[in-house]
Amino acid sequence: MHIYKTEKMKIPAKLWSKDIEKSALEQIETVCSLPFVFHHMASMPDCHTGYSCPIGSVIATEGVVVPFFVGVDIGCGMCAVKTSLKEISQEQIKKIFGGSKEFKGGIRGNVPVGRNHQSKKQPEILMPGIYELAKAVGGLPNAIVGQQWNSALKQLGTLGGGNHFIELQKGSDGFIWIMIHSGSRNLGYTVAKHYNNVAQELCKKWHSNIPAFKGEDGLAFLPLNSEEGQNYLAEMNYCIEFALANRKLMMGNIMKVISDTISQEIVYDEMINIAHNYARLENHFGRNVMVHRKGATSAQEGEIGIIPGSQGTKSYIVRGLGNAESFKSCSHGAGRKMSRTVAKKTLCLEDEVKAMDDQGIIHSIRGLGGLDEAPSAYKDIAVVMEEQKDLVEILVELTPLGVIKG
């Protein structure tokens, strides 16, 4: 970890990466000049340029919440399940994945991906514990959750697009693992955009001198003691629970597909879940502050987490070390080293496909359009893990066997 501080910055930033692009450093400088940011900003080793503030940021604030410090995919996160399987063949993985003329159904037939939704609403009982919360939040004036409730039920149990994925892996513990990366779908996006717009209007009304990073509008805030701030937190927390319910339903459907495909009894361990886009009231350096994790995960002492690589590279089950300097956080993945546009323009399709074919990975690159999610578009996960060895310890190293990308 090293400290970054310029004359413009009110507080320093503590960086766990030696390889942060100039635009991300400029965003860090802008964030650290804001009057409500507390103590220091922590940038994880997967830090890279985002909208208004970098992805891979941990930002503590006093008295306010900033919707875009959470991001637009509220509650996006990882889940993983260890199975009792010790071996699985490529032929079995192909059958489990499905979606081809030879192997119909499978995961692709049971988990909609990309922009696809369920053909009908999923039962509300699939979201135990959050149905009442949804009703309560839906009762707020102009609540997004209330407006989106019916469409959200059709998005429950769907993967989404971008860097979301389903992966089968072989663990260093000798067992086969299932991993999912997904979020709150359009619900979280709509909530985030709505409350950022509310924050923008209020900041204008109050004549708040909040800077814009190169014309972007993601630094507006909502006071915690305001109705708007409390409404955002209520809807944000609902989206976090919705994203978890979404992962649970997908995981249940995937486990059923695997059990139906492989003719032997399979035991599934309890699901590990960790979110990486949210805000939570926590106590750090003697103060109660709102900790925003945008592309970062909690890594309290003893807490079990998941740090994925890119398709074609290793992922990790980890245990948090509770490092106070990172606000007890760690990276949420490898982190991009080039934008999606640059990746599609510069990476060689044949090289990327060959690299994964040579490893025997059943991957999701089918053409030039898939290069934005190629392994070479991401930072080296081994370096990322080395840079945060004071934040987490590795419990299980996971090698990819097959991946479905959103």
Image (spheres, rainbow, N blue to C red):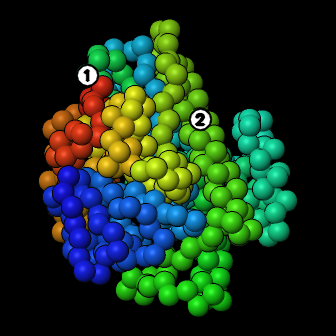
Q: Which residue in the protein does label 1 denote?
A: 172
Mark number, residue 152? none
The residue positioned 54% from the left and 77% from the top of the image is 220
Q: Which residue in the protein does label 2 denote?
A: 248
In contact (CB < 8 Å): disc 1 and disc 2:
no
Q: Residue 355, located in which quarter of the rendered image?
A: top left
Residue 230 in view (yes/no): yes
Rendered view: 212 above or below 41 = below
Residue 76: x and y in percent read: 51, 51
Residue 349: x and y in percent read: 20, 58
Observer-nearest residue: 264 or 74? Answer: 74
Circle 2 sits in a helix, a strand or a loop, which is it?
A: helix
Q: In this view, does 379 lie to the left or right of 301?
A: left
Observer-nearest residue: 294 or 250? Answer: 294
Residue 164 in view (yes/no): no
Q: Is residue 97 left or right of residue 172?
A: right
Observer-nearest residue: 47 or 190? Answer: 47
The residue positioned 29% from the left and 18% from the top of the image is 173
